Structure formats: C-alpha cells, structure tokens
C-alpha cells in the first residue's frame, strides 16, 4: 500500500471512531446527575413559584432541553442535532456563557482563548523536547555517574508529582523568592500582546510548570533508548573504526532511537492540552483549559461536548502524523 493510500485509509478510519467517542460522551454527560438549567438561572430572583417556573421553562427551551410544547426532547434527538451541527463545523452555543440572554457560540469562545493556550503549549513543548533530549543524552552517555544518578532521582521525583501539585510548588517557590505568585491579572492581556511585557511576565510560571511536567517522561525514554542502542553491535563496530564518540552517538545511535521517541512525542501533544487544564486553573490563565474546566463545573453540556470532541480528534490526528513521520525517519518502513 502506498503512503497516500495509507493516509486516506486512516482518515476514513477516524470517522467511525469519532462517532463512537461522541456517542459515548454525549450519553454519559446527559445521564450524569445535576440540572444545567438551574446552573444557568444562577442568582435569578423570583418572588413567586410561577415566576421561577416560567424562567426555568424559558431557559430550558432556549437550551434545547424542552420543545415549544413543553415536552422533554429525547437525548438521541439532541445527539443527532449535535452530529449534524458538527458536520457543518458548528460546535453549538454555550449554555453558561451568555450575552443578552443568548448563548455565545462555542467556536467564538475557543477562538478568543486559543491564542493563549497555543502560546503556552508551544513554548512548553519546545522547551520540554530540547531539555528532555539533552538530559537523556547526558544520562545515557554518562551512565552511573553522579550526573546520571542525580538526574534520575530528579526525574523520578518529578514523575511522581501530579501536575497541579507541581504548579502549586512552583507558585510557592516563586512567591518565597520573588514575592510573585504568577496568578494573572487583566493587565497581562492588553493588546497588542507581543508588545505587552506583562504578558511575558505572567507566561513564565505556567510555561515552567508545563515544561517540567512534560520533559520527565521524555527524558527517561531518551535515556533508556540510547542505553539499549549503545549496546548494539553496529555501535561497537563504529567505535572500533575510530569514529569520534560524538559522531557515534548523534549520527548512528540517536537517529535509530528516534522511533519510540517520536511515538511518545506524537502522543504527548494532545496530553499537553489536557495538562494545561490543570496548570491554567492554578495560575488563572484564560486559555482553553480554563474554559473547558468552566464547562464541566457549570454543567455546560455543549462546551463539555466540544472538549470531548476536540481532545480525541487531536489525539487521532497526532497518531496519524506520528505514523507518517516514521517513514521519513526509517526508510525501511513501508505501508
């Protein structure tokens, strides 16, 4: 099978997988306890039960939970409407985020906050990848040295810490040293962002937290793969020919160890976005993570479905790109 045929096959494969994921998520969300209409009503003040019931029914109709004849709309009908909107690239309207009594389009909410999350995740991913590669190479080439043991202990400690706990520790340390918690203020997001020094100041701690959370596993993987490859016969032969140690590591050993590393990198990209939910909530970073967390807390079903659709789709796309990258790293791989 040609590479083009393989890509077409994988893209077609994504469609039924996404349908199954959305159906499962839609069912679980709708059978979970809690009434989203009450959450949307919020602090509405009504002096009589009639006033409250009228407001409740009005909001339920607006949210699509009741029809105009006050009958409950079955969940499978709402799922069909959701899939139909999704096929038209419409994520629906938020139930909790409203303007003039009407839900704000979720695509608008995502577009407004996307730049903050992309900036945070791209920076942390690049730093994680560079640091993990450097740490892994140093640990593998200096096995059992003081550097290797120290880095191994540090990586094990970092791997055992939940990401939100690591973010809290970074916040506490920053406050102790610099009297700076990193919790963002509105001054950080005055446009244009690129010329706003406060934006970069408040970007430091969330980026540091995501970077440390992401590099630990990748560094361990680089180390283990290099150690395994450095024991191979062709590496011993290259050294016996008198090749420079740096050339042996980077030209022969490192490239052959890239396949599992690329796999982990491809799988970690969607994980960075989900990890940013915790980091953004700790530092008050107004990105997609905070938006999606609000959707879960306030029973915003359309926003929750957008979350549970975007994350799996990103994972499937990352897997496809990872498999395609294999061909360019190892020409022996054929599809």
Image (cartoon, rainbow, N blue to C red):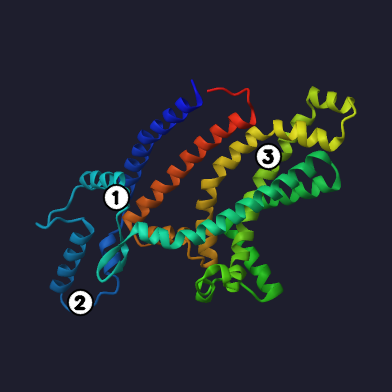
Q: Which residue is mark 3?
A: 221
Above or below residue 99? Residue 150 is above
* Percent of width and height locating residue 234: 79, 23
Q: Nearer the viewer, residue 93 or 154?
A: 93
First of labels 3, 1 by sequence position: 1
Q: Nearer the viewer, residue 250 or 64?
A: 250
Residue 297 position by quadrant: bottom left
* Crowding near the residue tagged with mark 2, few <14, some 14–19, many ≥20 C-alpha atoms within 10 Å: few
The answer to the question of whether label 3 and label 2 lie on touching residues, with beta carbons closer than 8 A, is: no
Asked which secondary structure carries label 3, the reply is helix
What mark, if any, has residue 30 been given in the picture? Answer: 1
Asked which secondary structure carries label 1, the reply is helix
Above or below residue 233? Residue 187 is below
Residue 218 position by quadrant: top right
* Percent of width and height locating residue 318: 51, 40
Above or below residue 131? Residue 198 is below
What mark, if any, has residue 138 been given in the picture? Answer: none
Circle count: 3
* Percent of width and height locating residue 304: 37, 53
Q: Which residue is mark 2?
A: 46
Asked whether residue 322 is in view, the answer is: yes
Above or below residue 255? Residue 27 is below
First of labels 3, 2 by sequence position: 2
């Amino acid at each position: 099978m040609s590479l083009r045929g393989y890509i077409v096959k994988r893209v077609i494969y994504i469609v039924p997988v996404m349908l199954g994921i959305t159906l499962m998520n839609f069912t679980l969300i709708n059978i979970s306890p809690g009434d989203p209409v009450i959450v949307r009503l919020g602090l509405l003040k009504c002096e009589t039960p009639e006033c409250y019931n009228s407001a409740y029914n009005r909001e339920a109709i607006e949210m699509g939970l009741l029809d105009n004849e006050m009958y409950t709309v079955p969940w499978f009908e709402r799922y069909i409407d959701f899939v139909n909107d999704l096929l038209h690239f419409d994520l629906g309207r938020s139930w909790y985020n409203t303007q003039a009594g009407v839900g704000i389009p979720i695509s608008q909410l995502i577009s407004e906050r996307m730049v903050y999350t992309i900036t945070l995740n791209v920076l942390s991913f690049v730093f994680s990848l560079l640091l993990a590669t450097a740490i892994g190479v140093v640990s593998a080439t200096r096995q059992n040295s003081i550097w290797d043991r120290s880095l191994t202990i540090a990586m094990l400690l970092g791997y055992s810490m939940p990401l939100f706990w690591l973010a809290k520790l970074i916040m506490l340390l920053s406050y102790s040293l610099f009297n700076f918690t990193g919790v963002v203020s509105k001054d950080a997001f005055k446009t244009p962002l690129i010329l706003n020094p406060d934006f970069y100041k408040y970007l430091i701690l969330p980026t540091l937290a995501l970077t440390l959370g992401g590099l630990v596993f990748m560094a361990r993987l680089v180390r283990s793969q290099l150690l395994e490859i450095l024991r191979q016969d062709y590496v011993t032969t290259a050294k016996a020919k008198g090749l420079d140690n740096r050339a042996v590591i980077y030209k022969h050993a490192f490239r052959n160890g890239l396949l599992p590393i690329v796999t982990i990198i491809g799988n970690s990209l969607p994980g960075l976005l989900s990890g940013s939910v915790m980091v953004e909530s700790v530092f008050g970073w107004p990105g997609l993570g905070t938006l999606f967390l609000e959707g879960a807390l306030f029973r915003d079903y359309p926003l929750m479905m957008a979350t549970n659709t975007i994350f799996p789709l990103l994972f499937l796309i990352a897997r496809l790109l990872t498999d395609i990258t294999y061909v360019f790293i190892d020409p022996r791989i054929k599809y």
